[in-house]
């Protein structure tokens, strides 16, 4: 069953372009191993019972061993099936199978024993094939073109997944969530109004890598970044840079979603017990069960990579070869739901004894999206505190990583960019999690640049900027000719000109929900939102950062609504919909 499931997923992905979120390239052997671990104990138990009472229990054994694969196969092939209907149908299929096999038990046993060597061979082939592919990628990295140019500035892009600027003490938040970043920011430039192009991971990262807005790209819920536009990693690699990606968000930052293009070394999926567990249908069914979660006392994603398993390998890779400059992309997921910070960080942010309800610790806001009224005000506050503690933990990890690079003598010749792909919502405007609105809670992100001698120290830029301008900025600050490879304007223009704010282009963002689009436009201090149902709103992001007072409704905007709509339409057309989105995704 596991082999058939892996074959189906890989065929659907590579032949029909239907991507499976969280599909490890190791699934070809992981899925059969996972199913073997699930069914072998049950099979041995039933075999023992069968030997004791063959006449009474042989049919029960056959029924049991056929019902589970049938139920899981139905759920996998037809996810919209009601579970009750799937259970009845699977039971019927298992019953008919048991009847057919009742007088053919000896044949079935022979087939099973003869299949085991084949299964072992396929698993071995899968392991060997993946090892060979990894070896070929590493060999290709060693054959990379020599570094061209005299400017050997390194680039480190640190993306703190799901971290909103509103909750950073660096940005005026009243809780000490980012003392480390605050300290490092003194030797760099802070952008007080940086905005993502989308409120969820894939389009946001794709914009940071290509300089394009999401509607220009191929990305969607099950659609990867294609090769229409070059990526920053490809351009720097062609220049002779070493390129390495170290990924915690394997759902949408994995190689299969196109973000690995241009990287010689890309660490996304890891071989771990959690990954093996999640590679089979039965593992995913069990992992979604709150009852099983409570029994195991485990409320995190199975296989989620904590910061030390990401920034540790990244540090070793950055310091291993100093013959050429590097471009390192590090994605950290520890502030993503379900917020599970270390106990010492969590304890510093708890203000009330309200416990976190166990059923909400796993996919907390996924549940609140369906039933937001189930979270009381106190419980919602407790989730917010756990989120803040998670940010504080990430702050410690970033502080440690930058400190290690400084001790290695690398930091001061490295362009460090610290940002986030999107923010998070805790009931503001009726929304939870992210990926479902274009309010400031999901779009306003931190942005810090540090490169002594080229990036001013202690500077704060208040002009709104877009993360889509990241590639243009990197090329300018590292001395790589832009050659019209990326659109946009370097962030450096914001600190070089006294009237940079007046000349700054508008900032745009979008999210596509089931074929309908919500869009946003930031013009100076005003944040204009255009909703798919036809409404609109304008907020002053300087005086009203949490966006409580709609200036458009009050008739207090600098321009009429048609003016904002026309500017936004010129940047993001409504018609094209490359992919649909479900709410609350990573």
Image (tube, grey):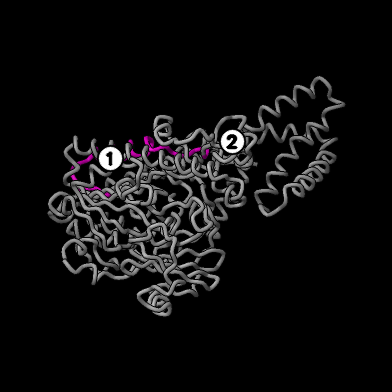
36 and 383: which is toward the camera? 383
Instruction: Using the image, tell me which numbered label, if any, was put on residue 478.
Output: none
211 and 467: which is toward the camera? 467
The picture places residue 438, in percent across and down from the top left corner, at 45, 62
* Residue 350 position by quadrant: top left
Q: Report crowding for label 1: few under 14, some 14 to 19, many 20 or more residues within 10 A (C-alpha).
A: some
The picture places residue 458, in percent across and down from the top left corner, at 18, 50
Q: Residue furthest right?
A: 55
Q: Is residue 155 above or below residue 353?
A: below
Q: Report crowding for label 2: few under 14, some 14 to 19, many 20 or more residues within 10 A (C-alpha).
A: many
Split into 4 quadrants, where in the image is the N terminus? Answer: top right
544 and 57: which is toward the camera? 544
Q: Is residue 444 left or right of residue 127?
A: left
The Cα atoms of the two marked residues, 2 and 1, are separated by 41 Å
Q: Residue furthest top?
A: 52
Indicate yes or no whether the magenta region holds residue 293.
no
Choose the circle earlier in sequence order: 2 or 1: 2
Instruction: Using the image, tell me which numbered label, if any, was put on residue 180.
Output: 1
Residue drawn 39% across and 73% down?
556
The picture places residue 198, in percent across and down from the top left corner, at 42, 60
Residue drawn 12% across and 52% down?
453
Residue 65 visible in this rendered orientation of the protein = yes
Q: Is residue 315 left or right of residue 93?
A: left
Q: Secondary structure at mark 2?
A: helix
The picture places residue 228, in percent across and down from the top left corner, at 39, 66
Q: Secondary structure at mark 1?
A: helix
Asked if labels 1 and 2 touch by Cβ distance under 8 angstroms, the answer is: no
Residue drawn 56% across and 48% down?
366
Q: To which residue does mark 2 refer?
A: 34
Q: Report the magenta residues as a range.
A: 301-327
Indicate yes or no whether the magenta region holds residue 308.
yes
* Residue 70 position by quadrant: top right
């Amino acid at each position: 069953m596991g082999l058939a499931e892996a074959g189906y997923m890989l065929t659907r992905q590579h032949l029909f372009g239907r991507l499976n979120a969280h599909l490890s390239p190791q699934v070809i052997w992981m899925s059969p191993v996972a199913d073997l671990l699930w069914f072998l104990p049950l099979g041995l138990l039933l075999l023992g019972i069968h030997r004791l009472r063959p006449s009474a229990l042989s049919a029960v054994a056959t029924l049991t061993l056929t019902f589970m694969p049938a139920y899981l196969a139905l759920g996998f092939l037809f996810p919209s099936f009601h579970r009750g209907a799937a259970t009845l149908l699977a039971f019927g299929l298992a019953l008919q199978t048991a009847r057919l096999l009742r007088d053919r038990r000896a044949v079935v046993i022979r087939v099973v024993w003869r299949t085991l060597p084949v299964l072992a061979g396929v698993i071995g082939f899968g392991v060997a094939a993946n090892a060979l592919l990894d070896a070929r990628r590493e060999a290709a990295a060693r054959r990379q073109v020599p570094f061209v140019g005299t400017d050997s500035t390194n680039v480190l892009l640190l993306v703190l997944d799901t971290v909103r600027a509103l909750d950073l003490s660096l940005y005026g938040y009243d809780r000490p969530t980012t003392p480390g970043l605050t300290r490092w920011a003194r030797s760099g430039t802070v952008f007080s109004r940086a905005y993502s192009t989308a409120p969820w991971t894939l389009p946001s990262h794709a914009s940071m890598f290509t300089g394009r807005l999401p509607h220009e790209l191929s990305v969607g819920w099950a659609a990867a970044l294609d090769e229409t536009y070059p990526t920053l990693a490809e351009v720097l690699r062609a220049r002779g840079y070493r390129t390495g990606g170290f990924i915690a968000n394997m759902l949408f930052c994995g190689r299969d979603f196109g973000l690995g293009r241009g990287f010689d070394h890309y660490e996304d999926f890891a071989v771990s017990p959690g990954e093996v567990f999640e590679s089979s249908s039965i593992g995913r069914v069990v992992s979604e069960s709150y009852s099983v979660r409570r029994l195991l006392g485990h409320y995190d994603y199975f296989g989620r990579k904590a910061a030390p398993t990401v920034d540790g390998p990244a540090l070793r890779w950055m310091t291993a070869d100093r013959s050429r400059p590097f471009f390192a992309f590090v994605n950290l997921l520890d502030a993503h739901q379900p917020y599970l910070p270390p106990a010492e960080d969590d304890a510093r942010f708890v203000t009330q004894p309200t416990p976190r309800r166990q059923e909400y610790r796993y996919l907390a806001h996924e549940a609140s999206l369906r039933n937001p009224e189930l979270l009381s005000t106190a419980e919602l506050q407790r989730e917010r505190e756990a989120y803040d503690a998670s940010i504080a933990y990430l702050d410690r990890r970033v502080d440690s990583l930058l400190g290690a690079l400084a001790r290695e003598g690398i930091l001061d010749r490295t362009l460090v960019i610290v940002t986030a792909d999107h923010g998070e919502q805790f009931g503001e405007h009726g929304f939870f999690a992210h990926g479902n609105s274009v309010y400031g809670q999901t779009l306003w992100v931190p942005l810090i640049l540090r490169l002594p001698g080229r990036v001013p120290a202690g500077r704060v830029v208040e002009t709104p900027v877009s993360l889509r301008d990241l590639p243009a900025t990197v090329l300018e600050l590292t001395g790589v000719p832009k050659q019209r490879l990326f659109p946009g304007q370097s962030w450096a223009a914001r600190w070089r000109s006294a009237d940079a704010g007046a000349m700054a282009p508008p900032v745009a963002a979008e999210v596509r929900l089931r074929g309908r689009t919500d869009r946003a436009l930031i013009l100076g201090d005003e944040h204009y939102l255009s909703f798919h149902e036809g409404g609109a709103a304008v907020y002053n992001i300087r005086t009203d950062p949490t966006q409580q007072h709609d200036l458009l409704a009050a008739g207090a905007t600098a321009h009429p609504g048609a003016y904002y709509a026309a500017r936004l339409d010129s940047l993001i057309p409504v018609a094209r919909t490359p992919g649909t989105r479900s709410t609350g995704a990573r």
